[in-house]
Image (cartoon, rainbow, N blue to C red):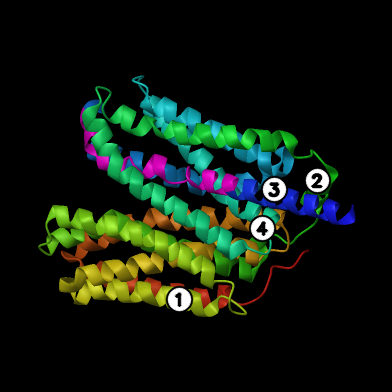
Amino acid sequence: MLGTSREVQKRERTARFGFAFIGVLLIAANLRGSFVSVGPVLSNISEDLGLTTTAAGFLTGLPLIAFAVFSPMAPGVASRLGLDRTMWVSLLILAAGIVFRSLPVPGFIWAGTAMIGLAIAFLNVLVPSLVKRDFPLKVSQITGNYTAVQAGVAAVGAAVVVPVAQTSPAGWRLGLGIWVGVALIAMAVLLPWLRRRPSGTKQAAVAEQTYRSPWGSALGWQVTFFMGLQSVAFYVLMAWLPTIEQDHGVSATTAGIHLSVFLLVNVFASLAAGALLHRGSDQRLISFISGALMVATFLGLALAPDLTLLWVLLGSVGCGSLIVIALSLFSLRSVNYPQAASLSGMAQSVGYSLGAMGPVLFGGLRELSGDWTLPLLVTAGIMAILALMGLLAGRNRVISAA
């Protein structure tokens, strides 16, 4: 009887682990696609709605602004509403925002995009907290898997949105609207789990534990700057890499292929980083090497532009590793999942602010200097600071409990 009981308990634990893992991956599938897919059809949107270049740029930047503004609010809402309920409601807001954005109603594209930014801001912040709570011994592996899903879905979204828009009478509205299906699937799968989870005292007790705010911690700021500077690397490359390549004689088609290669390699780099991150006593070595890859990427683009594909590959490996490290650090440097949520909110608020400014300042340096050398060299210097932050944030320490 005792053996049978243990076997039943083991099967139940395995089932809970599997369900929680699927839930994390479904949430991850909603974290990039709905806003990354705007870029390929931005010209269609601008023509249809009569947007100026400035307005179109603001439309693409609005989610990042929302990330910066709303990320610090997520931990407080989760502590009152509960982590699981907050994430489910965030998916509901995301689904509504996707629908609003696609409706032919004046102003709805802006309201819908803001709702999407709000929802993803909350999900971005709370997923590391969820991983800390449900997978405390497998933080890096789970983070690598869900980051790979993000990158994979983003690559698929960038590839399919134009064909869908071209073959549908609804055009870009359907190309962007299909993402509501991904959100609805996640909501449907997670709803039974939400109902089964106890309102329970254990979760409330953990949430009420005192912990030191990361805003007053040197380690918290080291993790935050690491998150922010790796965001600068990713968003600068996403915004400017195709243009840099074309200015160096690469065709638009080839530049597009290189961007697809970047996103694809990003998936495998995320999985590899998740598998390697927990093997050492700390994360300093992998953090520094990943930062050094970004230094080499931007130096290479500046000094040896004929080897663009090499720098694309190095940059993809670096970016894919860095985001996994940054997201893992929210859990690895915290004492409990409420503190992980607080650190995640802080780091992503500041981080996405830097990420949003990066491409703008990069473009400003290009305009000031007349070529790409100065902005690329300046960014390489910033990546050197990123590598240094990796050495500091990668130490085996946690922010104190109180």
Is residue 205 in sight in this rendering? yes
Residue beneath disc 1: 387
Callout 1: 10 Å neighbours few (<14), some, many (20+)? many
Q: CA distance from mark 3 to mark 4?
A: 11 Å
Residues at marks 4 and 2, CA–CA distance in whole angstroms: 18 Å
User: What's the magenta region?
Assistant: 22-47
Q: Which residue type carries mark 3?
A: Arg
Observer-side mark, 3 or 4, equals 3
Name the residue located 33 percent from the left edge and 28 percent from the top edge: 174
Instruction: Write the residue at 15% across / 64% down.
Output: 370
Q: Earlier in the sequence, mark 4 or mark 2?
A: 4
Q: Nearer the viewer, mark 1 or mark 4?
A: 4
The quadrant where residue 23 appears: top right
Question: Between disc 3 and disc 2, whose residue precedes?
Answer: 3
Q: Which mark is residue 204?
A: 2
Residue to which mark 3 is pinned = 16
Q: Is residue 189 left or right of residue 198?
A: left
How far apart are the alpha carbons under marks 3 and 2? 20 Å
Mark positioned earlier in the residue sequence (2 or 1) = 2
Q: Label 1, secondary structure: give it.
A: helix
Q: Nearer the viewer, mark 2 or mark 1?
A: 2
Residue 38 lies in the magenta-colored region: yes
Residue 149 shown in magenta: no
User: What is the CA distance from the residue labelled 2 to the residue labelled 1?
Assistant: 38 Å
Judged from the image, the secondary structure of the residue bearing numbered disc 2 is helix
- Looking at the image, residue 283 lies above or below residue 190: below
Image position of 142 (left or right of 397): left
Question: Is 35 situated above or below 99?
Answer: below
User: Which of disc 4 and disc 3 is earlier in sequence?
Assistant: 3
Q: Is residue 61 left or right of residue 118?
A: left
